[in-house]
Image (cartoon, rainbow, N blue to C red):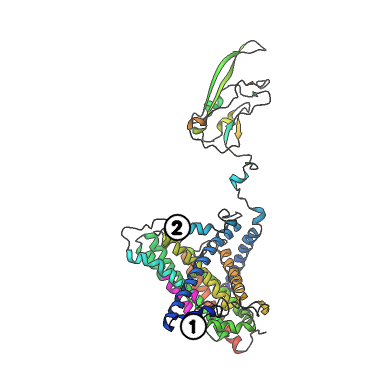
Amino acid sequence: MSYFSDIYKGIKTLLTGMSVTGKYFLHSRKGAITQQYPDNRETLKMFDRFRGEVIMPHDEENQHRCTGCQKCEIACPNGTIEIIWDRGIDEETGKKKKKIDQFVYHLSMCTMCGLCIDVCPTDAIEWGQNFENSVYDRTALTRVLNEPGSKLMPGVED
Amino acid sequence: MIRALSITKGIHDWLYSIMSENVAHFVEMILIALVYLAIFAIAGLFLVLLERRVAAWFQLRIGPNRVGFKGLLQTMADALKLLSKELTGTEKADKFLYNLAPYFVIITALMALAVIPFTQDFQAFDINIGILFLIAISSIGVIGILLGGWSSNNKFALIGAMRSGVQTISYELSIGLSLLTMILITGTLQLSEIVEVQKNGWLIVQGHIPAIIAFMIYMIAGTAETNRAPFDMAEAESELGAGFHTEYSGMKFAYFFLAEFINMFIIAAIATTVFFGAWLSPFGITESIPLLGVFWFLAKTMMLVFLMMWFRWTFPRLRVDQLLTLEWKYLLPLNLMNIVIMALIVWQNLTIQF
């Protein structure tokens, strides 16, 4: 008599499913995963792996870790990164040395593939958490990542 | 015919004192129609909001909470938006039938609403074949869907309408037979007398095991009758666009949409009346205040509506062959067997009465 056992199994599995969704229903107040975005702007924190934009962190003395090796520029598949570099005299050794003048980043062309960050040997650039990228003029999407007057952090090249 | 509601006896007497009998009768009918239209609109909008909130809670979301206090005016705003939208249609549509279809759907829903006993004497039309009337009316509703699907001259709409026809015709049987099981206990089709019988205990208690089986079959068939998930093959947005109302826009679409929710309310209301004692309070705790009957009726109906929403947000959609297998191979034989058991129980006086 598989007919009646089929009915029994059918009802049992339906009730199992309903108990699962019923639990979700009862816990929805605590566990709601919806972010009410413009209201919680102050407390909103994006998750660690979020890819918003490429940033270059600077420390308190306005120093970054970019040596100007241009590996990111070569790795980028669509020409998002342009490094304008120069040769300057190094104070300690007195030799001519390559250093960056401007790290230009075109956000409008970036596909957030992350190859530049993977390839960077000194971890100079990383992912930022900002996602509010709408602007009225697209020239605002072209950014210079190194701060004016910043210089290379000592010891990065060793 | 139309019984004057005891709540509105004052208005009734006043109307008859200022105009002749025929005119007063006519005016009264119009007034009652307006009241039911208002109930229709408010209940429909409220149910849409409820559905959206319940769906959100099932999916761990928040749901609409911006318009008005806690989002209570959300569906009002949606209705206003739909009112202001353009009514589009296909060029080769059969214009007359295309425009007629939404009214078919909405009128049948309204007619079914008329016989439902909200509380003692709050029933516009108490005929002695109430249940039969409800079953008949609910199957006329599908004509509106078939007309809409056929006349909009769109393959998706036509497929949706045909599926809806297949589904409604099949599941009509189960609805009728499961209600018939309960009629064996009550011995009458009149809704007010069915409520009267339940003063000795709700029918789901009186009829115990076969009544519970009948209730389960009724809820399954009722969900299918209203074309809701998991039986929403008539709309099946992932397969057919929107099914029979693909080509409708603006207020005509809103009519279909509202009628779907009112039909759900009606299915739940019939279940309340037949299985759960309509407006009777549990153990007769508020029997002295007849107006509270509305509260009990709506509370029970909302519980059943919630159950149908629970089905919708839990179960995946059935295929057409699974749908027909469920009806013809499982529900129908079980139903027939159930009727025999119920007949035996009534014959041997094994019902539980208080």
- Tag 1 secondary structure: loop
Circle 2 marks a residue in which chain? B
Q: In the rendering, which numbered label is found on residue B299?
A: none
**Residue that carries the numbered disc 2 in the rendered image:** B82
Q: Residue furthest bottom?
A: B348
| Boundaries of the magenta span | B113-142
Q: Residue furthest front?
A: B18
Q: Is residue B292 above or below residue A41?
A: below
**Residue that carries the numbered disc 1 in the rendered image:** B127
Residue B262: give x, y in percent of width and height.
50, 68
Q: Give the amino acid type for the residue marked by disc 1 in the picture.
A: Ile
Q: Pointers 1 and 2 in contact (CB under 8 A)?
A: no
- Tag 2 secondary structure: helix
- Per the model, the C-alpha gap separating discs 1 and 2 is 36 Å
Circle 1 marks a residue in which chain? B
Mark 2, Cα crowd under 10 Å, few <14 / some 14-19 / many 20+, is: some
* Residue in the image at 60% along x and 69% along y: B303
Q: Is residue B149 magenta?
A: no
Q: Are marks 1 and 2 on the same chain?
A: yes
Which quarter of the rendering shows the C terminus of chain B?
bottom right
Q: Give the amino acid type for the residue marked by disc 2 in the picture.
A: Leu
Q: Earlier in the sequence, mark 1 or mark 2?
A: 2
Residue B165: give x, y in percent of width and height.
42, 69
Residue A73 visible: yes
Mark 1, Cα crowd under 10 Å, few <14 / some 14-19 / many 20+, is: some
Corner quadrant of residue B295: bottom right
Question: Which of B340/B55 is in front?
Answer: B55
Q: Residue furthest left?
A: B92
Corner quadrant of residue A7: bottom right
Residue B207: give x, y in percent of width and height.
61, 81
Residue A81: give x, y in percent of width and height.
52, 27
Q: Is residue B126 magenta?
A: yes
